[in-house]
Amino acid sequence: MDSIILPGVDTILLESKYDAKGNQIEESIKSGQGFVKSTYKYDIKGNVVHSIKYDIDENIVFKANYKYEFDSNNNWTKRITIVNDSTTHTTERIIKYF
């Protein structure tokens, strides 16, 4: 567990859990302002495919799913984010190979 101390701000406690592959599977942030917890699931390539954010009472605040398109080198070039069953945004990236 890490503590982040900023002048004039409550102490923030950050706790992260990782799977055997080093992927972050859970993150909890606690402060005087409240609590938030997120969980993550990954595909076999290590890309986040599902995340859930919870409030202090463990109620689901939102669920996000991620869909990817890959290039011939198996790197994702397009990620579609779907929150609560609606597409919220699309991220595209261009990778130049030398």
Image (spheres, grey):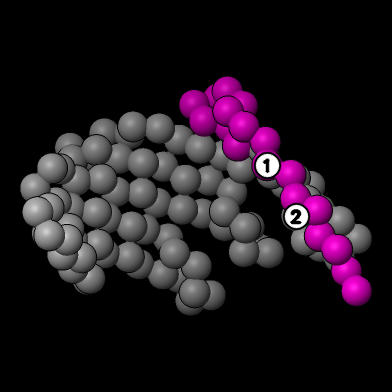
Q: Which residues are magenta?
A: 81-98
Residue 46 lies, in percent from the top left, at: 62, 64
Q: Identify the image quadrant of residue 61.
A: top left
Residue hosting label 2: 76
Residue hosting label 1: 91
Q: Identify the image quadrant of residue 13.
A: bottom left
Image check: 53 left or right of 55? right
Q: Say which amino acid is labelled 2.
A: Trp
Query: Which residue is located at x 13 percent, y 42 percent?
Result: 33
Proximity of marks 2 and 1: CB atoms separated by less than 8 Å: no
Residue 24 lies, in percent from the top left, at: 44, 64
In the rendered image of this protein, does residue 34 appear above or below residue 96? above
In the rendered image of this protein, does residue 96 appear above or below residue 40? below
Image check: 74 left or right of 19? right
94 drawn magenta: yes
Residue 55 lies, in percent from the top left, at: 24, 38
Badge 1 element: strand
Query: Which residue is located at x 22 percent, y 71 percent?
Result: 1
2 drawn magenta: no
Q: Say which amino acid is labelled 1.
A: Thr
